[in-house]
Image (cartoon, coloured by chain):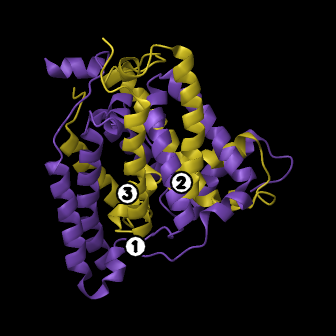
């Protein structure tokens, strides 16, 4: 994986090798997941500053509507897929310090940046220079986190376990999954549709005609 | 050619993509989009994973997300050029001009700083909008629900305090 003579190019190639060896989809499948993920975001326009900062200002609700609908539908589907043995749980641990402190920092940054780590790359690919500058900041953030990981670990705290609602209510988990999903779907439709539009957006203007 | 999809089509397609990624036919793992950042930082600065244990910890998921990110960049660039025609070099977003200011310096400095802290926050919490919100809540994970509530509150409070309420005309 690493030796002191390895250069950027070697490490870049080893990324593909790791994915190929890991068995979580071939390089092609993972690359296509990326294309689809980026395209859905791009066509729904939820990567736009107007949508994300607009949500923070409560002037645009496309992001929460789409997010809650996706989670609601997927949570019901995933529950049945896991029952059938077609998928498995990958729950993240409850580390209260990290979740609360990280969540606050993430929310503040997302409101100001108007992007998150999944939507930022779409804007970079569309030529948004401010987001390219933010990406450089992000890489440095990743560097600082890596260099001082032991210090950050203290802030994150210890894991209180990998708990899920469907795991906690084991006997009635089918009903829990169904209610959880349906409530989120209902919320997504109940949120009134507000839109903050970027008038320079060529694609949007053509749509309006 | 379709240039925009409504929120509910986007939500349904995203649900299908999440399920494909979770399924054994797809990748048998959730979609995540913030581990690739420290992974690329380690790559660019050629850090030794044996010295920096975080890099060893994230080697597999960072590689996976790294390849996915290349797909995102490739797909979005092709779309932007040929289909949505949304490629253009810009610095200050329209809504920033409306609700904040017209200054290029202001936008770039805030972008850099918020980009930096966005990743610190995501890595502290162990996930972002993709890993916690989308993939985590889909599994009804308690950690992701906590993250979701904290982020929503912090996002809306910042939106209220940081931006002007009325647009500059």
Q: Which residue is mark 2?
A: A102
Residue B126 appears anywhere in the view = no
Q: Is residue B156 above or below residue B135?
A: above
Q: Name the chain under label 2.
A: A
- Along the viewing direction, whichever of B127 and A104 lies nearer the viewer: A104
At a point 30% along the width and 21% down the height, the residue shown is A198
At a point 67% along the width and 39% down the height, the residue shown is A140
User: Element at badge 1?
Assistant: loop
Colour assignment, chain A: purple
The residue lying furthest to the right in this view is A4
Q: CA distance from mark 1 to mark 3?
A: 25 Å
Quadrant position of residue B108 = top right
Q: Which residue is mark 1?
A: A88
Query: Which is in the foreground here, disc 2 or disc 1?
Result: 2
User: Element at badge 3?
Assistant: helix
At a point 47% along the width and 75% down the height, the residue shown is A162
The residue lying furthest to the bottom in this view is A171
Q: Are marks 3 and 2 on the same chain?
A: no
At a point 74% along the width and 53% down the height, the residue shown is A148
Q: Is residue A177 left or right of residue B168?
A: left
Report the chain shown in yellow. Answer: B
Label located before the other in sequence (2 or 1): 1
Q: Point out residue B56 in the picture as x, y percentages from the top left corner.
A: 70, 61
Q: Are marks 1 and 3 on the same chain?
A: no
Q: Point out residue A186 in the picture as x, y percentages from the top left corner.
A: 15, 57
Q: Which residue is mark 3?
A: B149
Tell me if mark 3 has few (under 14), some (14-19) or many (20+) residues whose alpha carbon lies within 10 angstroms of its own: some
């Amino acid at each position: 994986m690493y030796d002191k003579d390895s250069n950027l190019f070697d490490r870049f190639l080893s990324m593909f090798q790791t994915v190929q060896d890991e068995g979580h989809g071939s390089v092609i499948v993972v690359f296509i997941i990326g294309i689809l993920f980026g395209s859905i975001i791009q066509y729904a326009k939820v990567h736009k500053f107007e949508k994300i900062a607009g949500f923070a200002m409560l002037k645009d609700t496309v992001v929460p509507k789409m997010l809650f609908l996706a989670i609601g539908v997927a949570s019901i589907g995933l529950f049945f897929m896991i029952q059938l043995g077609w998928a498995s749980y990958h729950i993240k641990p409850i580390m209260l310090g990290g979740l609360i402190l990280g969540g606050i920092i993430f929310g503040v940054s997302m409101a100001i940046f108007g992007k998150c780590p999944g939507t930022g790359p779409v804007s970079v690919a569309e030529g948004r220079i401010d987001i390219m500058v933010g990406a450089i900041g992000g890489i440095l953030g990743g560097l600082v986190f890596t260099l001082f990981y032991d210090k950050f670990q203290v802030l994150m705290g210890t894991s209180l376990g990998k708990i899920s609602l469907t795991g906690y209510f084991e006997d009635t988990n089918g009903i829990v999954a169904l209610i959880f999903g349906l409530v989120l779907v209902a919320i997504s439709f109940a949120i009134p549709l507000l839109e903050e539009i970027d008038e320079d957006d060529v694609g949007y203007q053509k749509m309006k005609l | 050619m379709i240039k925009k999809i409504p929120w509910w089509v986007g939500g349904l397609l995203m649900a299908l993509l999440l399920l494909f990624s979770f399924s054994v036919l797809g990748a048998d793992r959730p979609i995540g989009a913030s581990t690739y950042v420290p992974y690329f930082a380690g790559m660019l600065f050629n850090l030794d994973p044996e010295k920096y244990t975080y890099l060893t910890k994230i080697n597999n998921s960072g590689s996976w997300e790294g390849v996915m990110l290349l797909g995102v960049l490739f797909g979005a660039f092709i779309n932007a050029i040929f289909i949505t025609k949304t490629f253009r070099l810009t610095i200050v977003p329209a809504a920033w001009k409306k609700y904040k200011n017209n200054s290029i310096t202001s936008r770039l400095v805030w972008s850099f700083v918020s980009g930096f802290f966005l990743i610190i926050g995501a890595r502290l919490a162990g996930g972002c909008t993709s890993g916690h919100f989308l993939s985590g809540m889909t599994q009804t994970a308690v950690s992701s629900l906590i993250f979701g509530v904290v982020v929503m509150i912090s996002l809306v409070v910042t939106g209220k305090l940081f931006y002007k309420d009325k647009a500059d005309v």
